[in-house]
Amino acid sequence: MSAPVPVSLWRDRRFRRFWAGQSISQFGDRISELVLPLIAVGTLHASANQVAWLTALIWTPNLLAALLGAWVDHRVHKRRLMVLADLARASVLLTIPAAYLLGTVTIGHLYAVALVIGAGAVLFNTAYPPFFAHLVPRSSYVDANSKLSASRSASYVAGPAIGGALVQAITAPLTIITDALSFLASAVLIGRIPMDEPRAADDVAALSLLRRAGKGLAFVVRHPVLRAGLGCAATVNFFTFVSGSGLTVLFASRVLGLSAATIGLAFGVGAFGALLGAVIAPKVSRRVGVGRSIAVGAVLFPAPIAIAAAADGPVWVRAGALAAAEFLSGIGVMLFDVNLNSLQTAVIPDGMRSRVAGAFSMINYGVRPVGAVVGGLLGTFLGLRTTLIVAAVGGALSLLWLLPSPIPRIHSLATLRPGDAAGGVEMACAETAP
């Protein structure tokens, strides 16, 4: 049985405010992702190693996400924490143009900004799940994630171009003000959303922070849906970072012989694929089921890079293969993310949401830099083409996490209950299987 199509979320003023805040913030993030390295390279003449450290420091706070999630779960006002995270990131970003005008920008300053931005992102992302679960009706989880993912995909299409134009007009350090303003806008819009938040978890009040984090990780490991989802997502992320954008660009330039403009166009096509995937995810989910949509995305996200790896012949064939690979991968990642995020929201109980989010971030994001390092080693010793094929095959094998789990048999979220253990999930599968 499939649940009826819910009323459009565009009629919900609270969701519209949240969506607007997140959309503005996403466009600001795309600008910062471009501008921070440009400041390091153009203004401070940083080395490649220093730029790499700048990127690494943004991801580093995820190593403590499980502990932060355990702390957040014990706080009542998740919305206030999200606003605090936005305000902290806006404040630290504004120190860059101030230091630039005073002539005191240093690489150490940028490192500190990157670390605070990363910590703010972890705080926001661990407070986000319980907030989202009570903002959006269960029947609209997939639709809401689709709308939010579509905005994120659109930011990848237009954000870098906007950032580049602003850098040309007002310099890179002053362009960073736009991302700070985007965080301020997000804070204002989220702060104006009325919501009755659930009580903080009290079942672990006497436990230490470390034990609370351990209980969150243990819950993920024991839960058949969460365990399979995390294993699949971490495997996909590891192998997609093996072939990461840097290695793919290197392959496209040196092996396929494509120009920078052609490579940029191919990546732009990929961004449109992600936008399309976010838009169609709810329809695909209703037609084939949530679980099967996740399974399709788990393969369609990493596997298409093999198309580019196998490309040969005229320039238009090589360019077309890269564009097709990016386009299909963009659709796949959205089918995977939108449906898996919605399914996780449906099965995680309120008192565990932030702890589970922290455990996921620690593992799922923690494998990304490892994958990037492994990709560099494989590219050096096996060659770029072989490395991309290894990444495609390895990423597609993430499906093996899903096949023995209940996930492929879950058609709708309607009958899933938060906190369901294996028995409850299996019962929901029997009730919802087509």
Image: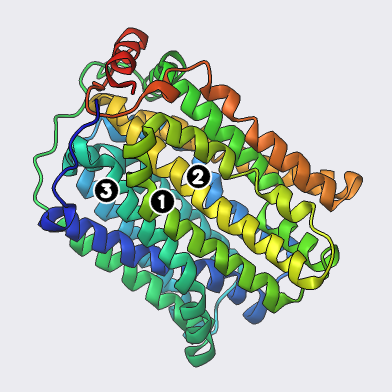
Badge 1 marks a residue whose secondary structure is helix
Q: Residue at x 32, y 45 (%)?
A: 282
Badge 3 marks a residue whose secondary structure is helix
C-alpha separation, residue under disc 3 versus residue under disc 1: 20 Å
- The kind of residue tagged 1 is Ala
Q: Residue at x 30, y 42 (%)?
A: 142
Residue 246 placed where, x, y %?
Answer: 70, 59
Quarter residue 39 falls in: bottom right
Label pair 3/2, CB-CB below 8 angstroms: no
- The kind of residue tagged 3 is Ala
C-alpha separation, residue under disc 3 versus residue under disc 2: 27 Å
Q: Residue at x 69, y 70 (%)?
A: 263
Q: Residues within 10 Å of mark 1 (few under 14, many from 20)?
A: many
The answer to whether 148 is drawn above or below residue 313 in the figure is above
Q: Residues within 10 Å of mark 3 (few under 14, many from 20)?
A: many
Mark number displayed over residue 61:
2
The answer to whether 324 is drawn above or below residue 368 in the figure is below
Q: Residues within 10 Å of mark 2 (few under 14, many from 20)?
A: many
Label 3 vs 1, first from the N-terminus: 1
Residue 317 placed where, x, y %?
Answer: 75, 66
Label pair 2/1, CB-CB below 8 angstroms: yes
How many badges with numbers are in the image?
A: 3
Label 3 vs 2, first from the N-terminus: 2
Residue at far bottom of view? 169
C-alpha separation, residue under disc 2 versus residue under disc 1: 9 Å
Mark number displayed over residue 121:
1
Mark number displayed over residue 144:
3
Classify residue 250 as left or right of residue 272: right
The answer to whether 131 is drawn above or below residue 99 in the figure is above
Q: Nearer the viewer, residue 340 or 372?
A: 340
